[in-house]
Structure formats: structure tokens, C-alpha cells
Amino acid sequence: MDKKGFEPKILAFCCNWCAYAGADLAGVSRMQYPPNIRIIRVMCSGRVEPELVVKALSLGTDGVLVLGCHIGDCHYISGNHRTVKRMAILERILGYLGIDPARVKLEWVSAAEGARFAQVVSDFTSKIKELGPIPLQELRP
């Protein structure tokens, strides 16, 4: 598929307490952002394991967002610190698999940041459009 008509499939893991509420605020405020995103609500961004992201990419998702509470604001105290560590590990795993680490992005979005949520989604969608579709052969032996 050429990049010109390409519409990426983007998966977002959103923390229940902040990012998901930020997404909800963006929706009820009728803020515009690309419809390419599918949201999975998780209790904490710290629960998003690298294996989940790799699995999503292997099934044809073109990009994955992990959205959580700002550092210091985690409902579970240190969950987002765990997320930072896991995303560093994930970046190395993606490198080993030959996948551009730019296909995965970690961002902090609070419940009051609906506009920020919309901007993050818009920027990430643009970035994934530039990268084009994920070549699935990268993930196959």
C-alpha cells in the first residue's frame, strides 16, 4: 500500500485515572482528532507490558500509544515510573525485531488535559502516516 492513501491503525493504552478521563474530556468537549485510534483502558500505564505492544504490532497495528498519569500523580504511586522502565525495555526489543521505535510513544495526559490528548493523538497519527504501514514481515521469522 502506498503512503498516500494510507490510514494507520493506532492502539492507545490509556490509564483509567488520567489519560482515559482526558480522552473522555476531549470527546465530550467535541475536540477534533483523527479517528484512527482505538482505546484500551487499563487501570495503570504500569500494567502495559512490552509483550502486549509487540503483539499489537505483530497483528497489524501501525502504532501504539501508551498514555498515563504525569510523573508524581499516579493513582498507584509508582506505576508510571514502572512504565518508563518498561518503555525503555520495549525500545530495545523493537530494535532487535527491526521495528522503528517511533511506532510506539509514551505520553503523560491528565484528566483535565482533553486538548493535550487530542494533540498527542493528532501528532502521533501524522508521524505514523509518515512511516507508512507496518511491514509485517519484520515480525515474522
Image (spheres, rainbow, N blue to C red):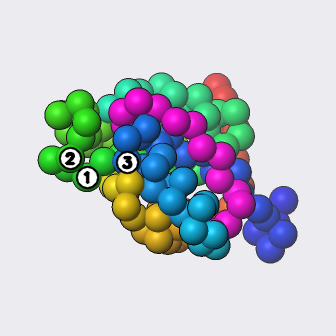
Q: Position of residue 44 (x, y in %)?
A: 36, 33
Residue on which disc 2 sits:
73
Q: Nearer the viewer, residue 45 or 130?
A: 45
Whole-number angstrom distance, CA of label 2 to CA of label 3: 9 Å
Q: Quadrant of the C terminus?
A: top right
- Vertical relation: 50 (above or below) 71: above
Q: Nearer the viewer, residue 95 or 73?
A: 73
Is residue 131 something that shows in the picture? no
Whole-number angstrom distance, CA of label 1 to CA of label 2: 5 Å
Q: Quadrant of the N terminus?
A: bottom right
Does the magenta segment cover residue 44?
yes
Verify CB contact (< 8 Å) between mark 2 and mark 3: yes
Residue on which disc 3 sits:
18
The amino acid marked with disc number 1 is: His
Taking the image as shown, residue 57 lies to the left or right of residue 86, namely right
Q: Position of residue 2 (x, y in %)?
A: 82, 66
